[in-house]
Image (cartoon, rainbow, N blue to C red):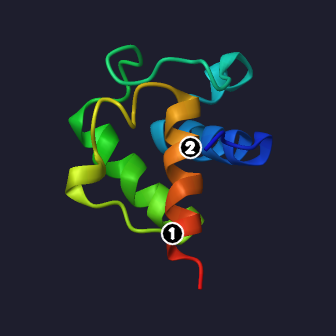
Amino acid sequence: MQPSHDHVHAVIEVLVSTLGIEDQASTLDASTPLFGELPELDSLGVVELAAALEEHFDIEVADDDVTGEVFETVGSLADFVAGKQVSSAP
C-alpha cells in the first residue's frame, strides 16, 4: 500500500510536534530517514511517537510493530499508519 499525501502530511505533523523538531518540518517528506537518522528519535522518542500516532489516528501500535522497517522513513511510517487504519475499519 502506498501512503497517501494526506497520511504523509499527518505523520509529519505528529512527528514534528511529538519530537519538538518544528525547525525541521519543512525539510521532511516521505523519503526522510527516521530511525538512526533523527537524534530526537531515540528509544523514548519512539515510545512517545507511537503513543501520539495511536491517539491521532485512533490505531493501536503493538510492541511488535515497532521495527526498524516501520520506522525507516516517514513514508514507511505513513504506510504503516494507513495499513493499521484499513485493518481496523469496520
Quarter of the C terminus within the rendering: bottom right
| In the displayed structure image, the side of residue 49 where residue 85 appears, left or right | right
Q: In x, y percent, where is residue 63?
A: 21, 55
Q: In x, y percent, where is residue 20?
A: 52, 35
Q: In x, y percent, where is residue 66?
A: 28, 45
| In the displayed structure image, the side of residue 26 where residue 18 appears, left or right | left
Q: In the image as oriented, which residue stretches furthest toward the bottom?
A: 90
Q: CA distance from mark 1 to mark 2?
A: 12 Å
The structure residue drawn at horizontal position 46% and vertical position 64%, both measured from the top left corner, is: 54
Quarter of the N terminus within the rendering: top right
The structure residue drawn at horizontal position 74% and vertical position 44%, both measured from the top left corner, is: 4
Q: Establish if 83 lies above or below 29.
A: below
How crowded is the residue under tag 2: few (<14 C-alpha within 10 Å), some, or many (20+)? Answer: many
The structure residue drawn at horizontal position 63% and vertical position 20%, both measured from the top left corner, is: 24
Q: In x, y percent, where is residue 88?
A: 51, 75
Name the residue beneath numbered marker 1: 87
Quarter location, residue 17: top right
> Which amino acid type is shown beneath numbered disc 1?
Ser
Name the residue beneath numbered marker 2: 79
Q: Secondary structure at mark 2?
A: helix
Q: Establish if 55 lies above or below 78.
A: below
Q: Secondary structure at mark 1?
A: helix
Between residue 69 and residue 49, name the one nearer to us. Answer: 69
Quarter location, residue 42: top left
> Which amino acid type is shown beneath numbered disc 2?
Asp
Looking at the image, is mark 1 or mark 2 earlier in the sequence? 2
Between residue 3 and residue 53, name the one nearer to us. Answer: 3
